[in-house]
Each structure stands twice: as structure tokens, then as C-alpha cells.
Image: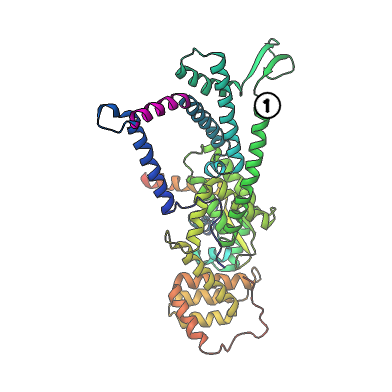
Amino acid sequence: MRQIQLEEKEIQVLQTLDQRGAMSPSQVSASTWLLPGETLNLLRDLSNAGLVLLRNDTHSPDGMVVTITQSARSYLSITSTNVRQRKEK
Amino acid sequence: MAPSIPASSPPKMSFMTRLGIVLLAVVVVVGCLFLIFPSDRVMTPDWVPAFQSELRAALTIVSPYLGVALLSMVVAIAELASTFPTYPREALRTRWARILILVNVGAAFLALIIARVTMPATNPVLLVIGVGVGFQAIIRTRFVLAKAMGGPEGSDNEVSLNLGWLYEQFQHLCRTQIDLELMKNRRTAVTQLLQYYPTIAELYDIAYYTIIARATLTPEEERARVEQLQSLIDPKAPEQFARNSMALTILENGGPAYVEMLLNQAMGGPAEAAAPRRANQEEVVWQLINNYSLTGLVELTRSLTDDAKVLDWVSQAAAANENTVEANQKAAIAYFLVQQVGLPGIQQGLQGEAERPLPDQPEDAAPVEG
């Protein structure tokens, strides 16, 4: 399996998408307290890494929608399991 | 005009229909009692025992036909339900489903008549079971009389007698016609879903949770369906196609009753108030985006809250940034305000703002289309 190293902010964005489902990048900004420009950059990076899907949506206020991929969900579940195991030790 | 629930939804039984069913049940029970009860042992008019015996004789003749009709109907209904597992009720209500059931019943009647004529001495119960089950099996069977050793099944190197060929053709015709009849309802349901859940985010979420909430899907099936859904949100898929396909995914995975529930929710029905609240939120967000400039939003935030962290975030979000566009900045601030201040607070603020002219409203600012 491909090794993925993510920064804290990226994990925060992925966790938000995992918990709250598909949303517009502006909703991600509002939920994570990240600034809009920074959020868009993060989302583009995550999209290039295949962890989120970013596409246009004319019905969204900012014209875009983003959702988490299954591989990112798997990554998050593995990460949370590892963290739990480390805490238990 | 408020749209109606799709035609595929089951109609609610009226009081008269329910009363009719109860009356029919009472008539059946009374009829059975009348037939079973030995009226010649009690004081009854003379015509009653005679009528009773005539009725019994008539039933003796009719009951084998009722038996085979019932068995053939069960087989035809089971076939239809397994062919249209997502819409069994709707499929059974179509015209071609009725034709299929009627043809099955008619063929079973014919088989029973032939059997009774050719084998008059056979036990009637055995005859009913034999025709009701055996005939249904025979008209769906292909007999292989000779086959090449080791040859694949259904190859040209075998001699077979396909008694089911004719029925297969008829079944295929019925299946196609029922599918076409259901298309109308499917299209209505999809259109209404798109009307009430217009954003890809909403449709994707509902479709995703519909798939993972299904109890009968195997993990492999679930994964395949989620992957198929993900392929729709891919930027390569055209937007309208993606929205239509997601709505269809919801319908195919959740069924018409589930879609009806979603539409009821969206219309502000009694089931849940979550969807209307979300619609309110979207409405306020669009209002903020369309009516305020970035500086206007910063001013509005100042009038709504004293929280330094919130004010600081909004000021930074409104600052010029080459990585983003104004629509994205405005939308982020609008959602942020909804989360931090709350809908009632913003609505009050907007009402207060509406009563006085906006000094910083840009005259040439074109509103974003909603």
C-alpha cells in the first residue's frame, strides 16, 4: 500500500469531510477555521493525491463541491486505529 | 405550484376502500360459515338446505380452477418480484404485469381442462397440485435429449426440446413493457429529487448513505456501488449527468418509498425538520453572498458579534488572496457566520440592515446566480 504522510491540517480537512459528507470548499473553510485560499490549496493537493474529489457544481455558492474518497476513508480509519493502539500502550 | 409526490408512490387507502375490504372479509366468513354449518339440523326455511347443497356442488367444480389460478398467480407474482426487486409493488401495478398474470392463469385453466378430460379418474387434489405446479415448471423448461460428451451447456452440439421458448419470448415482452411503464415514474422521481436536492453535495451524501445503509448488500456489492458513485462526482463527468445519475442511484438503492420520504422531508413534512432547516441555511447564505460585498460582510460581522476570534477570521478571509476568488471568500464567510452566530441571529441582523441603506454596497456588483 502507498505510504501517505499528511499534515495536521490535511487530516483535519479529511476528518471534516468524513464526518460531514460532501460539501463546498467554503463550508470546509467555515468548519475547519482555515482561510478560503488556504483551504482551496489544501483541497487541490489532496485531490492530486487522490484523497478527495473536487468538481464544479453550479448550485453550490462557490461553484464547487468536494468529497472524500474511499482510500482516504481507509487511511483515516487506519490512522485512528494506530493512534488508539499507541494510547493503549 | 407545489409538485406532487411521484406517481410511483403507493396511494393511501381511502376510507371507502378499507370499508370495502372489511365488508368483503365479512361476506367471505359468512359464506364459509353458511357452507360449513349443517342447516338441515336446525329450523330453517326449506330452500336453505337445497341452496346449500347446490352451492357445495358448484364449489366442488370451481375449486380446482381456483386452486390452479392461485398457484399460477403466485408463480407469476414471484417472477415479477424477482425481476424488479427495487420496485416490486410498482411493477405489479402495471398493465403488462396484469397481462402476464392473466396469461399464466388462463394457461393453467386450459391445462386443467385438458387434464380433467384426458384423466377423469385422477384425484382432484393431486390434479390441482400437478397442474398448478407441474404445468408451470413444464412451460419454463428446456429438455436436453442428447449432448456431446464434455461439451458446454447450451452449445450447438446438443439435441434439446425447449418447451419454455414461447413463454420466454412472452416473458421478455412483458419485462420490456413493464420496464418502459416504470420509466415514467422513475423520471418523475428523479426530477423531483433534483428539484428539492439540487446540489451535488446533497445528492452525493444521500446516495452514499443510502448505499451503506442497505442491509442486504454484500461488502463487495457495497464497495462496487460506492466506487460507481465516486465515478459520478469525478470532474470528468458532466455536471447534469452526474446529478441525474446520483438521483437515480438514490432511487435504485432506496426504492420509491424512500424517495417519497426524502421528498416529504424536503417539502417540510412532519417526518423530519432537518431538510427545511438546511434549506433555510442555504437561503441565508445566498442572501449574504448576493447582497453584501466582502467589506460589507466584515461590517455585518462586527454588528453581529463581539467575538475577537470570529472578527479576526472574517477580516482575514475577506482580505485579497490570489489563491481564491471572491465567490469562494464570500461563501466561506457566509457559512462561517451561520455556524458562529446562528441562523436566528443573522436573520435578525439582516432585518435590521434592510431597514437602513447599505453604505458600502457596490453599485456595479453583479449578484451571484443561485
The image shows a total of numbered marks equal to: 1
- Along the line of sight, the residue nearer the viewer: B319 or B152: B152
Q: Which residue carries the number 1 mark?
A: B166
Tell me: residue B302, above or below residue B239: below
Q: Is residue B112 visible?
A: yes
Q: In this view, does A50 lie to the left or right of B23?
A: right
Identify the residue shown where x is 43% and y is 63%: B273
Q: In this view, does A22 lie above or below B174?
A: below
Relative to B79, is B291 above or below? below
Question: Under tag 1, what secondary structure?
Answer: helix
For image coordinates 60% across by 32% down, the residue present is: B103
Magenta stretch: helix, strand or loop mostly = helix
What residue lies at 54% left-to-right and 37% top-to-bottom? B81
Residue at the (67%, 57%) spot, across then down: B240
Residue B246 screen position, x and y as percent:
60, 52
Query: Which image quarter is the C terminus of chain B in?
Result: bottom right
